[in-house]
């Protein structure tokens, strides 16, 4: 596979693949089953705040 062919493949399908992975990872954070985990992670810095 020449450099030009690899570059053309990466420019087209590589971009599509990276966009798909990005959408999956962003969508994963908003799944309803992750709501408790996300809330716990957001409030983690406030745990034991009165002991500091």
Image (tube, grey):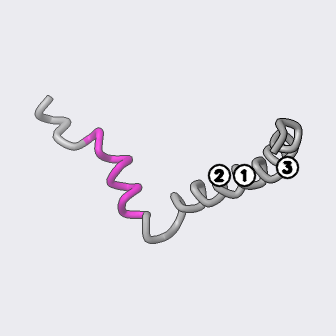
Magenta segment: does it hold 42? yes
Q: Position of residue 45 (x, y in %)?
A: 29, 39
Query: Real-space Cα distance between discs 2 and 1?
Result: 5 Å
Quadrant of residue 7 in the image? top right
Q: Splitting the image into 4 quarters, where does residue 52 fall?
A: top left
Residue 24 vertical placement versus 10 (above, below): below
The residue lying at 29 percent from left, 45 percent from top is: 44
Stretch of the chain drawn in magenta = 35-46
Front in this rendered view, residue 43 or 27: 27
Mark 1, secondary structure of its residue: helix
Q: Earlier in the sequence, mark 1 or mark 3?
A: 3
The residue shown at (15%, 35%) is 50
Q: Which residue is at the front of the view, 45 or 8?
A: 8
Magenta-drawn stretch, dominant element (helix, strand or loop): helix
Residue shown at 80% from the left, 53% from the top:
13
Q: Nearer the viewer, mark 2 or mark 3?
A: 3
32 vs 1: above or below: below
* Secondary structure of the residue carrying numbered label 2: helix
Mark 3 residue crowding within 10 angstroms, few (<14) / some (14–19) / many (20+): few
Q: Return the residue at label 3.
A: 12
Nearer to the camera, 46 or 12: 12
The answer for how far apart the CA atoms under marks 2 and 3 are is 16 Å
Estimate the x, y position of residue 33 in percent, counting from the top left.
43, 71
Labels 1 & 3 near each other (Cβ < 8 A): no
Residue 29 lies, with reference to residue 12, above or below; the image says below
| Contact between labelled residues 1 and 2, with CB atoms less than 8 Å apart | yes
| Helix, strand or loop under label 3 | helix
- Check disc 2 and report the residue beneath it: 22
The residue indicated by pointer 1 is 19
Sequence order check, earlier mark of 2 and 3:
3
Which callout, 1 or 3, points to the residue nearer the camera?
A: 3
Residue 35 image point, x, y percent: 43, 63
């Amino acid at each position: 596979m020449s450099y030009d062919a690899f570059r053309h493949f990466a420019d087209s399908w590589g971009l599509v693949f990276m966009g798909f992975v990005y959408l999956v990872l962003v969508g994963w954070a908003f799944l309803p089953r992750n709501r408790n985990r996300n809330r716990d992670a957001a409030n983690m810095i406030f745990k034991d705040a009165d002991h500091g």
